[in-house]
């Protein structure tokens, strides 16, 4: 029985990035409600709250509220400078502020972070958008894995102050950046270590708006894997590279189902139904009926039918002569047909037991150059490295992120702490 041991270096607040926000916000309340009260608190009159129902337009709400044509046009013209009225989602909150039966202003909550304020006090309306102030902080953590990465991170006492949703996000992020190298459900060993630096943008109520791993390390069975965030185009759409600037991404995911267990491997086996030795041309994953099945690589669907022992089956053709096959499916995902282009990780079907199967599972095959190969034995080459024209910026930014990561306790220190206890 392994014990779990973690060390954390602490959560450290950094720079604040924010747009204007005057009013102080209290924790218990929904921020945008507070904004509304803060703006109109001392004003006389009353506030009428409406919610956009399915098929209803913003203009209809204004009409139902009793606004004349000229007034409606004025509100909509002003609003359009900030957002498209026809794009408002069902459920959008609209608050109308009235004083002596005259419209003073309207607030429309676009999303959790943005509210459009339309001010009509001066006759013609004018609009502005108020964005909720956010702060950026960085979370550092390091530890050893007992039974699973999930348990290790979720139960880390030093992260107890972080909302459960944030902790879940840390685990899922680690799983995501290392998914091409390590199968967390199969390869993680007790005593494997991790450390990571996570940057998050928080709302005033403490919830995370966005966040990503800046740098991370996983030492699995003595082998260290690294992922360093870099955004080549500077548009927020970055990805992760290893210490040398090689992409962590591969042409194929390690497995077609997220949470599953391998029930039969590639090679010779005694067939459970045929009761004889046969070559098993794929890998079986046991999972509940209905579990989503993802295409492990980008490609084109070249087969989607029901056929004999395979049952419902999908074949996806990939570049460089690769083909993947997904069999015994309960059903196909919507919109998947022969000729469909699918991306890596896209759900194409659901686990079932059609065809020759003793229980719900996915039979997964990979073919290279027309021959079945063992998908668990192949090492796929990485995708494109850091672009050459970004190399200088990569060197600078990655050095900083790597230094942050390596300032955390590494495998040796974590192990020596474990030994002391
Ligand atoms: Zn099989």
Image (cartoon, helix red, strand yellow):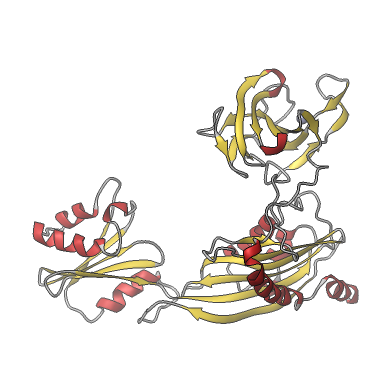
Q: Above or below — where is 208 with respect to 369?
A: below
Query: 49 or 208, which is in the foreground?
Result: 208
- The quadrant the C terminus occupies is bottom right
103 and 75: which is toward the camera: 75
Q: Residue 408: in sight, yes or no?
A: yes
336 horizontally vs 220: left or right: left
Q: Residue at x 40, y 77 (%)?
A: 19
x and y, in percent, of residue 337 in the image:
54, 29
Q: Is residue 344 left or right of residue 142?
A: left
Q: Is residue 365 above or below residue 184?
A: above
Q: Nearer the viewer, residue 39 or 369?
A: 369
Q: Position of residue 262 (x, y in %)?
A: 78, 40
Res 298 quadrant in image: top right
Height in image: 90 above or below 272?
Answer: below
Q: Position of residue 258 (x, y in %)?
A: 67, 46
Query: Residue 283 sits in which quadrant?
Result: top right
């Amino acid at each position: 029985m392994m014990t779990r041991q973690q060390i954390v270096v602490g959560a450290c607040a950094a720079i604040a990035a924010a747009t204007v926000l005057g009013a102080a916000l209290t924790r218990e309340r929904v921020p945008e409600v507070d904004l509304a009260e803060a703006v109109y608190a001392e004003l006389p009159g009353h506030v009428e709250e409406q919610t956009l129902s399915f098929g209803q337009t913003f203009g209809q709400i204004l009409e139902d509220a009793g606004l004349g044509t000229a007034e409606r046009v004025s509100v909509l013209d002003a609003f359009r400078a900030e957002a498209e009225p026809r794009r408002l989602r069902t459920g959008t909150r609209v608050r109308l502020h009235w004083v002596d039966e005259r419209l003073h202003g309207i607030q429309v909550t676009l999303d959790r972070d943005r509210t459009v304020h339309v001010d009509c006090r001066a006759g013609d309306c004018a609009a502005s958008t108020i964005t909720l102030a956010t702060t950026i902080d960085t979370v550092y953590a390091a530890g050893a894995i007992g039974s699973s990465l999930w348990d290790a991170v979720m139960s880390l006492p030093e992260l107890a102050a972080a909302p459960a949703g944030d902790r879940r996000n840390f685990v899922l992020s680690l799983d995501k950046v290392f998914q091409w190298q390590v199968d967390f459900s199969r390869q993680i060993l007790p005593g494997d270590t991790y450390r990571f630096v996570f940057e998050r943008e928080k709302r005033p109520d403490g919830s995370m708006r966005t966040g990503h791993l800046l740098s991370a390390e996983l030492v699995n069975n003595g082998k260290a894997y690294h992922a360093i965030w870099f955004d080549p185009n500077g548009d927020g759409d970055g990805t992760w590279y290893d210490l040398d600037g090689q992409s962590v991404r591969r042409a194929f995911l390690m497995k077609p189902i997220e949470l599953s267990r391998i029930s039969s491997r590639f090679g010779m086996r005694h067939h459970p139904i045929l009761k004889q030795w046969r070559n098993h041309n794929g890998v079986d994953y046991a999972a509940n009926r209905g579990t989503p099945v993802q295409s492990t690589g980008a490609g084109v669907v070249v087969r989607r039918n029901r056929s004999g022992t395979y049952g419902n089956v999908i074949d996806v053709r990939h570049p460089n002569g690769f083909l993947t096959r997904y069999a015994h499916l309960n059903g196909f995902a919507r919109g998947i047909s022969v000729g469909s282009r699918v991306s890596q990780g896209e759900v194409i079907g659901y686990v079932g037991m059609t065809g020759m199967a003793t229980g719900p599972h996915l039979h997964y095959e990979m073919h290279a150059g027309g021959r079945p190969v063992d998908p668990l034995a192949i090492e796929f080459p990485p995708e494109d490295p850091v672009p050459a024209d970004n190399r200088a910026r990569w060197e600078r930014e990655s050095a900083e992120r790597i230094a942050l990561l390596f300032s955390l306790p590494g495998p040796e220190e974590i192990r020596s702490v474990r030994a002391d206890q």
